[in-house]
Image (cartoon, rainbow, N blue to C red):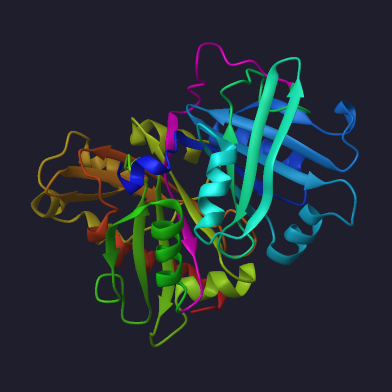
């Protein structure tokens, strides 16, 4: 049996944000990103300490949670980091096995197997420590068919299997920023503890501008569906975007979430109409674009109008675009990506993307 087979993961089950005001955050993801609020827990359901909204679209599930009492871990997390990702939950066949497998290989255990029941069955989970204050949660839904989990009540009902929204379909990858020297440590963690393998890596020659640079390695599970790029800052003339994140977030954490769409033009157009702001690359990026990346199915003028980036590798091409940070501080943001065969990460766009980010850093006085 291979290492990958020893630790099967079905999918990213959900991503939980700890925030200052969950009701407002839920409204942001509904109005700006097209999510439905499918489940809720809070005072009205008997929870006196936490309010959580489950937001779904396609196979993407976010949970936004806020403490309703001051002395609570969610309140402390939001105070320390601002709004951010606190929990990356992965659906597994057996949450007890996942906990034992990872802790026996060196993971720091946080919560051993917990079994919660209600009229919809038994929901099982366990938790280990990830980078910084981020938690990795293992969820087993094989005997549970409720809206989300015990303690939650159903709200908006999805017609069919998934809510199409504005076309956001599934999580492509989740990027973590770690401190200088921490990247290799966490690559080893994923390889040795969770049976992942390294897919690719980029050094400061690949990802750099005149002013700043970063280094990145990408790990994936045995199926190749679960991907975690890990970034660390590199030496540069000025502060890199990774160091800026670490300074404002207060340590390592999730930098951005990449979400797949089947039609990036319609998805991004809808998001812009809904008020979501994106990074802007210079118009010169689109000069001779077809000479650089070859023929693509999408309309070049429309792509330029929406400021979408294109990159090609030996397997195909991809289109991608990045939002501006969604907080008042320069921490978490989103990537919208459409793949036509390419399994890469847009290395040909790194320079243009970095220059766009540095423009924003300069406006903030942080470059």
Residue ID at (60%, 71%) = 251
Q: How many marks?
A: 0
Image: magenta residue range = 154-180
Where residue 95 sits in the image (x, y, percent)?
Answer: 58, 38
284 or 59, which is in the foreground? 59
Q: Viewed as shown, does residue 40 lie left or right of 89?
A: right
Residue lying farthest to the bottom in this orientation: 237
Magenta span contains residue 228: no
Which quadrant holds residue 349?
bottom left
Question: In the image, is residue 32 above or below residue 176?
Answer: above
Report whether 55 appears left or right of 352: right
Position of 9 relative to 155 (above/below): below
Q: Position of residue 306 (x, y in %)?
A: 36, 44
Quick check: 102 above or below 211?
Answer: above
Residue sticking out furthest to the top: 160
Q: Residue at x 42, y 67 (%)?
A: 231
User: Is 115 on the left or on the right of 97, as rendered?
Assistant: right
């Amino acid at each position: 049996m291979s290492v990958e087979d020893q630790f099967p993961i079905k999918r990213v089950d959900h991503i939980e944000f700890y925030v200052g005001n969950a009701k407002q955050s839920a409204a942001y993801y509904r109005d700006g990103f097209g999510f439905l609020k499918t489940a809720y827990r809070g005072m009205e359901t008997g929870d006196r300490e936490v309010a959580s909204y489950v937001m779904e679209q396609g196979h993407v599930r976010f949970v936004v949670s806020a403490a309703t009492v001051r002395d609570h871990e969610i309140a402390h997390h939001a105070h320390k980091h601002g709004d951010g990702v606190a929990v990356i939950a992965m659906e597994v066949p057996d949450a007890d096995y996942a906990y034992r497998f990872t802790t026996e290989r060196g993971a720091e255990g946080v919560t051993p197997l917990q079994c919660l029941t209600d009229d919809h069955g038994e929901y099982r989970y366990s938790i280990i420590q990830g980078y910084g204050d981020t938690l990795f949660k293992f969820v087993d839904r094989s005997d549970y068919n409720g809206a989300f989990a015990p303690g939650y009540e159903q709200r908006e009902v999805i017609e069919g299997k998934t809510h199409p929204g504005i076309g956001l379909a599934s999580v492509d990858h989740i990027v973590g920023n770690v401190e200088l020297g921490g990247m290799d440590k966490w690559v080893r963690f994923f390889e040795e503890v969770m049976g992942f393998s390294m897919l690719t890596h980029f050094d400061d020659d690949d990802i750099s501008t005149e002013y700043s640079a970063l280094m990145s390695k990408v790990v994936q599970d045995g199926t190749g569906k679960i991907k975690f790029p890990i970034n660390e800052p590199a030496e540069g003339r000025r502060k890199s975007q990774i160091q800026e994140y670490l300074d404002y977030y207060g340590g390592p954490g999730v930098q951005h979430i990449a979400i797949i769409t089947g039609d990036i033009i319609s998805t991004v157009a809808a998001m812009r109409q809904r008020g979501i702001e994106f990074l802007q690359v210079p118009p010169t990026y689109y000069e001779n674009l077809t000479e650089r990346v070859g023929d693509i199915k999408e309309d070049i003028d429309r792509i330029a109008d929406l400021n979408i980036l294109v990159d090609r590798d030996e397997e195909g091409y991809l289109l991608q675009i990045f939002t501006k940070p969604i907080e008042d501080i320069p921490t978490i943001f989103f990537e919208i990506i459409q793949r036509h065969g390419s399994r890469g990460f847009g290395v040909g766009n790194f320079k243009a993307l970095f220059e766009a980010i540095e423009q924003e850093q300069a406006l903030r006085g942080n470059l």
